[in-house]
Amino acid sequence: MDDAAATATADWNELASRVLAGHALTRDESLAVLQSPDESLLELLAASYRVRRQHFGNQVQLYYLKNAKSGLCPEDCGYCSQSVISDAPIERYSIANERTLLEGARKAKESNARTYCIVASGRGPSDREVNHVASVARKIKEELGLHLCACLGLLKPHQAQILAEAGIDRINHNLNTSRRHYPEICTTHTYDDRLDTLRVAHEAGMELCCGMIVGMGETADDIVDMVDELRQLNAKSVPVNFLHAIDGTPLEKKEDLDPRYCLKVLCLLRLGLPTTEIRIAGGREVNLRSMQAMGLYPANSMFVSDYLTTAGQTPEEDFAIVSDLGFEVVIGGHEAHEVPAGVS
């Protein structure tokens, strides 16, 4: 090991030790993680894994996502194939019926997912849609006992209360990017609109799932701002999406990411939010590519199977990643489950 590598190893290990002792990353430390040389990436991953192992062991939580309503959205989010300004050739349909949502929940159970995510496009749900999701949520809880997350857009206080009373455990509403960069990505609603939905979800008693999309032209400072905001929000789960540039969207030509930078982002989130569930989400297959498994050294969660309008890997391929690492899948609560035989 040369002098520079030895110094990097000592520095990242020392930072991990301070994080484990309760230290909150400074802005300079956060930027140093993102701007670190590729030569120190393995040392950075090892330090991040120390923090992950302390709080989550080698367990991996799997999420299964159901696109319950596709397209038909009046918002102009530049990354999204479902937005009003997108020409992407996607399916468009109104809110899925009870049978379809229950079938999705059963597939989530079969895929060893602990959490089932019901996602609907649009600025925000109608009261009819909220009552429909609430009715299905009660049946899923009764039949399958899954942890439930809903992502329905901007929520009113009474809608959040209905969802909470029906058994929705968590609301997902991503910040996506920093306050400074937000007007470059969306103009039909504001950053503060998103914060308001997170506030009403929290006041209704639901956990917050809130994350980001990396690769939309943001700076390292923007990413650090997002991590700081997520810390203040006390988000319980942070999905980290890496832009999958979809043809027909304004960001269709945006391909700025490489796997090494993606891993540095995940390390920053682990060191910056040491006790928070960090989930590798959309775009991991496209951007992490052959280095996907390494993402689970800092992160402790991932989606299994498909996303909203893009395909993911098969569940068997996802199980193989977990098995090859020697990690375990969390089924519910704190119990772990060995990866099914024949996929390692």
Image (cartoon, rainbow, N blue to C red):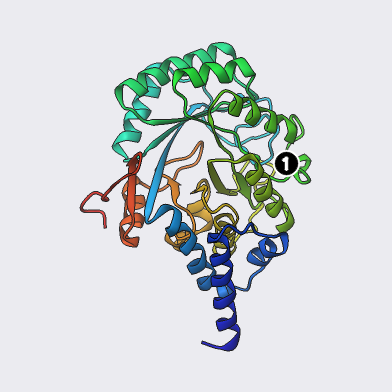
Q: Is residue 307 visible?
A: yes
Q: Mark 1 highlights which residue?
A: 185
The residue closer to the viewer here, 68 or 192, is 192
Q: Where does the image place residue 321, in percent across and percent down from the top left?
A: 36, 56
Q: Is residue 39 visible?
A: no
The amino acid on which the numbered mark 1 sits, given as a three-letter code, is Ile
Q: Quadrant of residue 190?
A: top right
- Residue at horizontal 59%, vertical 27%? 201
Indicate left or right for 319 with 158 as reference. Answer: left
42 versus 165 height, above or below: below
111 versus 201 height, above or below: below
Q: Give the quarter of the figure containing the C terminus.
A: bottom left
Q: Residue furthest front?
A: 21
Q: Where does the image place residue 15, in percent across and percent down from the top left?
A: 59, 67
- Residue at horizontal 72%, vertical 64%? 28
Indicate left or right for 190 with 316 as reference. Answer: right
Local SS, label 1: helix
- Residue at horizontal 54%, vertical 54%? 274
Q: Where does the image place residue 193, in percent across and percent down from the top left?
A: 72, 29
Q: Residue furthest top?
A: 128
Q: Where does the image place residue 75, in percent across and percent down from the top left?
A: 69, 29
The residue closer to the viewer here, 31 or 16, is 16
- Residue at horizontal 62%, vertical 45%? 212
242 versus 90 height, above or below: below
Indicate left or right for 38 with 323 as reference. Answer: right
